[in-house]
Each structure stands twice: as C-alpha cells, then as structure tokens.
Image: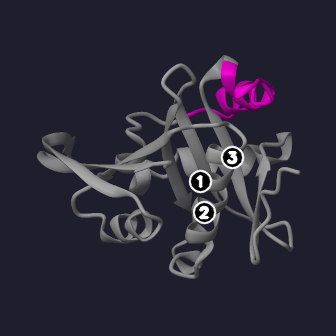
Amino acid sequence: MITLKGENIYLRALEPEDLEFIHTIENDESIWEISNTQTPYSKFLIKQYLEHAHKDIFEVKQLRLVISNYNDLALGMIDLFDFDFKNRRAGVGILVKEPNDRLKGYGREALKLLIDYSFKHLDLHQLYCNISEDNGASVKLFSNQGFKQIGLKKDWNYVNGSYKNEYLYQLINN
C-alpha cells in the first residue's frame, strides 16, 4: 500500500481547486529565485497545467504534490522533477508557502514521505536538489534527511544584480 500520510501532513495530487493556491505561489516574486521563475503565470496557463497534472510521471517527467494538513489546508508543494527512469534519479523541490508554517516540521515530514515513495515505489536510486548557498533552512532540511553536499556551483544564479553560488546535494539509496 502506498502511503503518503504522515503524522501531521499528507501529500496529495493536484486538484482543479488548487488553481488559486498555485497561482499565488507561482506569482510570488519573493520565491522566484527558488523556482528559477522570471515572469508571472496567468490563471489560464495554470488551469491548463492542472488539466494535465494527472499524467503519469513516466510521461511528463515530473510529479507535483500538495502538502496538506489534516484540516485539508494546503501548506505547500513538493516536486519530483527531471525524472530519469533509465538512470533512476530525480530532482526534488519543496516549498512551504506561508512563513508562519515554516520550521514546524511540515517540510521535514513531506520530504521524508517523498523520499520513501521515490525509493520504494518508483524504484529510484538517487535524488538530488539544488540549494542556494544562503538558504540555510533548506541546507539543514535536506542534510537532516541524509542528503550530502557533493558540489558547489560558483556564480550559478544571477539574482538582483549579483551572482549566487548554489550547492548540489544528493541522496543515494543503498
């Protein structure tokens, strides 16, 4: 049985009702650096995206899940991206939307659920993530789940007129 349920949160598929939630996240300029977004997204484009969100990870090479609490409140999103079945790896991205919902263990719980799902049900060999050098919360989150820093990409992202370094983290399923 696939379980994407934790003690305080669960992970669920995207629903048409998530339009406003996703629109708010995708158009929040304060997090564009994390998602490499350069322009706003229209509700029309997000609606089209949601209409195709049911497609299989093997087809679209991505899986986006909503992090929800048990009151069915959407707290954030967690993604598998660049899904590479041949090499059995994928990238991971995570965001808890509201600052007052951060540092409460929701991200940790969601990441643990996604790791277990990726290794046990998708049979992946490894997961990786890219973290800005100044994102201490994400460094701590991924490090505490067993990800190891394997590289530093110098001057990788151009943000607000200057370059930032980015860490590459990896978790190998042994």
**Horizontal side of residue 81 vs 109, given as left or right:** left
Q: Which residue is mark 2?
A: 112
Q: Do the residues bearing badges 1 and 2 touch, measured as CB atoms within 8 Å?
A: yes
Q: Which residue lies at the image location 72% right of the left edge and 42% below the top edge?
A: 121
Numbered disc 3: secondary structure: helix
The residue closer to the viewer here, 151 or 36, is 151
Q: Which residue lies at the image location 63% right of the left edge and 44% below the top edge?
A: 118
How crowded is the residue under tag 2: few (<14 C-alpha within 10 Å), some, or many (20+)? Answer: some
**Horizontal side of residue 166 vs 31, given as left or right:** left
The residue closer to the viewer here, 51 or 129, is 129
Reply yes or no: does residue 38 show up in magenta. Answer: no
Image coords of residue 15 (percent x, y): 83, 42
Dot 3 amino acid type: Lys
Q: Which residue is mark 3?
A: 120
Numbered disc 1: secondary structure: helix
Numbered disc 2: secondary structure: helix
Magenta part of the chain: 41-58
The residue closer to the viewer here, 70 or 128, is 128
Dot 1 amino acid type: Ile
Dot 2 amino acid type: Lys
Q: Which mark is residue 115?
A: 1
Q: CA distance from mark 3 to mark 1?
A: 8 Å
The residue closer to the viewer here, 133 or 46, is 133
Of pointers 2 and 3, the one earlier in the residue sequence: 2
Reply yes or no: does residue 52 show up in magenta. Answer: yes
